[in-house]
């Protein structure tokens, strides 16, 4: 279900939107919010609820790893998009689960007319890092229905 109204969306966003995602804002177009669900150093798996305002999306990026690694997304509220380079975009709704192997260039974010939240976690691996790339262009994003 699409939510343009933040007040209607909030009860569906069961893990809460958290704080403004200022640490990664340079890699996003639009407003995003981050609610860490595990504490670094206390849990071997980093887990966070990422919330996107309507029209918000992150830049193309690649999760690198010498071994293992990658990312998983579990969509919990609103509607969004996921796209791998060279492939058709995938519509995301609550319950969608996306596995992104290490080395795959991709982006994800909200639909133009909906708030969106997903749980993101980094798949454990050796020598992991995220390479942030160019923004998703207005033409690329604007073509999505």
Image (cartoon, helix red, strand yellow):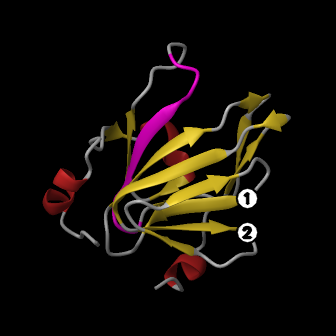
Q: Where in the figure is residue 77, as x and y percent of width and height?
A: 32, 58
Q: Which residue is mark 1?
A: 105
Looking at the rendering, the stretch of residues picked out in magenta corresponds to 43-55
> Tag on residue 85?
2
In this view, 112 is above or below 125 = below
User: Magenta span has 49?
Assistant: yes
- For the point 45% across and 20% down, the residue is 39
Q: Is residue 16 left or right of residue 117?
A: left
Q: Is residue 89 left or right of residue 8?
A: right
- For the point 30% across and 38% down, the residue is 18
In this view, 145 is above or below 2 = below
User: Magenta span has 51?
Assistant: yes
Q: Secondary structure at mark 1?
A: loop
Q: Which one is nearer the viewer's eye here, 126 or 26?
A: 126
Q: Which one is nearer the viewer's eye here, 127 or 74?
A: 74
Asked whether the beta carbons under mark 1 and mark 2 sit within 8 Å of each other, the answer is yes
Q: Which one is nearer the viewer's eye here, 23 or 75?
A: 75
- Graded by Cα atoms within 10 Å as few (under 14), some (14 to 19) or many (20 or more), the crowding at tag 2 reads few
Q: Is residue 124 left or right of residue 32?
A: right
What separation in Å lies between label 1 and label 2 (alpha carbons)? 6 Å
- For the point 51% across and 82% down, the residue is 144
């Amino acid at each position: 279900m699409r939510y343009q109204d933040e007040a209607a969306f909030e009860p569906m966003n069961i893990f809460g939107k958290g704080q403004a995602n200022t640490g990664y804002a340079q890699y996003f177009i639009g407003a995003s919010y981050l609610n860490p669900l595990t504490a670094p150093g206390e849990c071997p798996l980093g887990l966070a609820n990422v919330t996107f305002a309507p029209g918000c999306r992150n830049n193309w990026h690649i999760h690198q790893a010498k071994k293992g690694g990658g990312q998983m997304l579990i969509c919990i509220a609103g509607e969004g998009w996921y796209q791998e380079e060279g492939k058709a975009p995938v519509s995301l709704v609550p319950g969608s689960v996306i596995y992104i192997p290490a080395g795959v260039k991709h982006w994800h974010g909200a639909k133009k007319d909906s708030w969106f939240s997903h749980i993101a976690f980094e798949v454990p691996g050796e020598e992991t890092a995220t390479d942030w790339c160019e923004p998703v262009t207005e033409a690329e994003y604007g073509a999505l229905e």
